[in-house]
Image (spheres, rainbow, N blue to C red):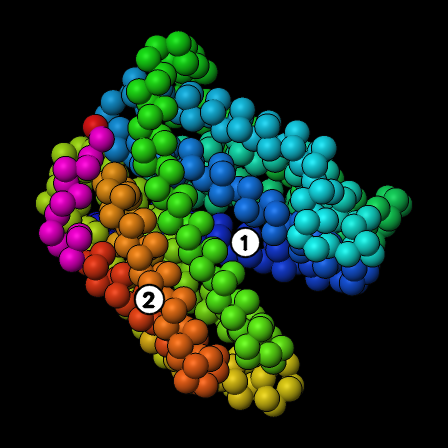
Amino acid sequence: MEKRKSLFQLAVPIFIETLLFMLLGIADIFMLSQFDDRAAGAVGASNQVIGNLNLIFAIISAGTAVLVAQNVGAKNKREIERVCSISLVMNFVIGLLVSITMIFFGDVILTKMGVTRSLMGYASNYIKIVGGALFVQSILNTVTVIIRSHGYTRESMLITVGMNILNIFGDAVFIFGLFGAPVLGVKGVAIATTVSRILATIIAFIFLFKGLVPVSMFKYLYDKPVGTFKKLIKIGFPSAMENMSYSLAQTVIMSIILLNLGEQAYIARTYIWTLSWFVVLFSISIGQANQIMIGQLTGAGKVEEAYHTGLNNFKTAMLFSVLGGIALIIFRRKLIGIYTDNQDIILIGSITLIVDAFLEPGRTFNIVLINGLRGAGDVIFPVVMAIISMWGLGVTTAYYFGVVLGLGLPGIWMGLILDEWFRGVCMLFRWRGKKWVRKVMV
């Protein structure tokens, strides 16, 4: 019972935090759409660029999460301080370089993406303000990862809640001119986003230095930083590559749908992706909690406990995934009907949701078990399998089933099922084989 309680103590705040980020994005776009449809489109395009840049920060953050968790388990305070100081400075420098790039070359990137002239005015304002302050986001990402890896997921969630409330309030003030404020539209949204992130970063630092690590930790910047830097990259780069491969594969599949199946199939895909994300959220939150638990247990040398904890966490996530899949099947037409009354889209979407119910358990294999392997420091095997399976199996069979055999969007989903289940079973064998035991870095 204690293990399960520990899982949910970690996972529930992560679930709420991730859900809030999703809802914030929805609220932003909704309020902007009331101001101007072009403003909503411009922010969407800008956020796509910013989202891709966040993957750069994820390299250091992923390495930080594993090393901090393992050293917390090992009770190695000196190494915790060394990792924290070096990762914070590294992501600050990287973030500063990215911010400067966005200020001077943001418009160029947006133009290359195909952003139209009618959207550029809004997009330019947004990317220069939010993109120009990305160094704040890079620091915030690192600090919250450190806090979570110590096991304080509730505190990380509360910081996010405060940031999101302030962000939405600021959006409303500047979009609708509340309390006599000027109507700034996109520029106001950008200012609200940036100010809320700055305040969240300050609060996160206060919590970090008050209870977890001392300010004096930065002395380790001059004490053998190269070795720690190598460890961060050794873990972080493969982890980021796996996410990049997934994002790129999904982009290619989106193009296949647009070019071969038409607009209605693409719209249905958008709605299905949004609906399935609420099921995936359970796996993501349990997966991240699993990484923290495995990192701390392996760091403490409790390999057998880590092994069984990983399997138990996986079974818990699988239960939620199966139940979520059943709900998608039962309520499929009503769920798609929330978004549209177009009967053709509802038909395509409802059939594909039935197929998606079989995809979600496969996705759970990968999300939870890969996070467990990552927590133990085993990062090369997942990324190699990701590249082989996503491209050799997922993309190719999605095209074959969906386009060549003429099965449409459900056929695309069948290809995704083959990828997720093949990789997932491989991850299960990897976990049960315990080769990850040799990858622990403390």
Residue 432 within the segment the image draws in magenta: yes
Q: Is residue 61 above or below residue 175?
A: above
Query: What residue is drawn where x is 40% and y is 66%?
Result: 395
Q: Is residue 100 left or right of residue 330?
A: right
Q: Position of residue 246 (x, y in %)?
A: 42, 56
Q: Quadrant of residue 235?
A: top left
Provide the residue designation for mark 2. Answer: 393
The reply to whether residue 277 is visible in this rendering is yes
Work out which quarter of the rendered image holds the C terminus and state it: top left
Residue at 14% from the left image edge and 40% from the top image edge: 437
Q: State the extent of the magenta-drawn residues as a range.
A: 429-441
Q: What separation in Å lies between label 2 and label 1 (alpha carbons)?
A: 34 Å
Q: Report the magenta stretch's main SS.
A: helix
Query: In the rendered view, would you say 221 is above or below 315?
Result: above
Q: Disc 2 or disc 1, which is closer to the eye?
A: 2
Q: Residue at x 33, y 63 (%)?
A: 392
Residue furthest front as drawn: 404
Q: What x and y, as percent, mark residue 102?
A: 67, 36
Q: Earlier in the sequence, mark 2 or mark 1?
A: 1
Q: Considering depth in this image, is 216 or 356 the residue closer to the camera?
A: 356
Residue 114 screen position, x and y as percent:
70, 55
Given the image, on which type of amino acid does mark 1 rest?
A: Leu
Residue 36, image quadrant: bottom right
> Which circle marks residue 20 in the picture?
1
173 lies left or right of 291: right
